[in-house]
Amino acid sequence: MIIICILCLLLCCAVFLLRKSMYLVTVIGASMSPQLVHGDRVLVFRWYPSRRLRNGQVVVLTTSRNKYYKRDSGRSTWYVKRIVAMGGDTFTQDTAPYPDADNDEHIRNKAQVDEAGRWSWHIPPGHIFACGDNRERSIDSRIWGPIPTNQIIGIVLAKLPGTSVVPPELTSRDVIPNTPLPSGEPAPDFHAETLSGEIVSLDSYQGEALLLLFIAKNSFSYQKTPAFPTLAEDLATHHIAVTFVFDGTRETAQTLTELLPASQSVLLAPRRANPLFDDYHMIGMPSYCLLDDQHIVRATGFTSFDAATLLASLEQARSDRSQEELNA
């Protein structure tokens, strides 16, 4: 009997240690495709010494301890990425990490850019540089900068057979846009609900130039949103309407909309229920789409934009239209 009790105790201890040292994580997004796709489940070993980390390992990490990366549950957002450089290394790529990155001071401060346009990041000791396998659709260290090793949750041991029974909703936080709407094309129509419950469409802005600012509940949106009201005021003086489009419900919009004036127009377009984000090819947030007064797409972009650039796009469109009318 004593032996059976000891064996049961040892078994319970083993199960307890196993549960504490292992995580079952579901992959969200396309940043690690084709090896790991949306809905895949991976087994993660938590207690992995940082001195054993190596290039090529797939890890689960969190990018920051600040409030912008916290979910409602209080736990930091986790990301699945591959280590591509270790402390003391330099990671280099020939192009910017995403469109408009050259104009984003926050991103440029983390990297060096040479005259040929090559970007490089030096990784200090005690840090790693981690990227998604699908670079064109991944937000990673090229934007965050090097990651301290103490922010690594664990190392991925294996991908489990099958996918999650209910794959998590594909959201915007882990991918960036690479196929924007072409300039000069008519904008897709849409229908979305305002915070007051009114349903509006593209026709609701008939005869107005319109800037659609696409935001979501992610760190970039939290960082950038406080500057947007000033942009909206600048554009309003030039008769350009500004509307925020939120990828979420009224309940989840609260923390972001608190950063905006009460009079600011906000549309709710949760991706799972409204095709607006997909129709406008908006994946990474925050992004924008500028329409002229005939609702022709004139400019799209990700993260970095200012009133002068947007106004120049509209002015060029007017000039081109006038020239076409003269030629006709």
Image (cartoon, rainbow, N blue to C red):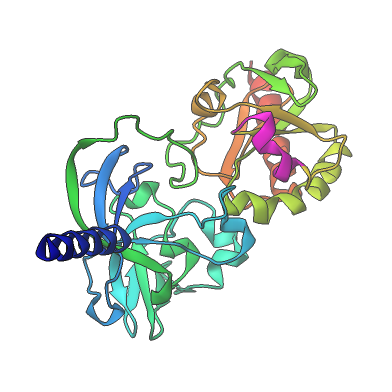
Tell me the residue at 81%/46% (across/down): 229
Can residue 203 be seen at all in this image of the molecule? Answer: yes
Is residue 87 depicted above or below 44 in this figure? below
Magenta residue check for 315: no
Please tell me whether the stretch drawn in magenta is mainly helix, strand or loop.
helix
Looking at this view, is 278 or 253 the one in front?
Answer: 253
* Quadrant into which the C terminus falls: top right
Can you give x and y, in whole percent of width and height, for residue 232 in the image?
80, 42
Describe residue 236's horizontal placement relative to residue 139 as left or right: right
Q: Position of residue 202 (x, y in %)?
A: 69, 17
- Spot occupied by residue 53 in the image (x, y as percentages of width and height): 25, 75
| Relative to 258, 269 lies left or right | left
Residue located at (33% from left, 45% from top): 27
Magenta segment boundaries in residue numbering: 248-257
Please determine whether, in this image, residue 39 is positioned above or below residue 21. above
Q: Residue furthest front?
A: 1
Q: Could you tell me residue 198's position as x and y percent?
A: 77, 16
Nearest the viewer among 63 and 183 is: 63
Corner quadrant of residue 82? bottom left
Q: In this figure, what is the number of numbered marks? A: 0
Q: Is residue 321 above or below residue 96?
A: above
Inspect the magenta stretch and tell me whether residue 256 lies in it: yes
Side of 41 where 98 appears, left or right? right
- Asked whether 146 or 279 is in front, the reply is 146
Please tell me whether residue 322 is drawn above or below residue 143 in the rendered image: above
Specify the quadrant that holds the N terminus. bottom left
Residue appearing at x 89%, y 39% in the figure: 237
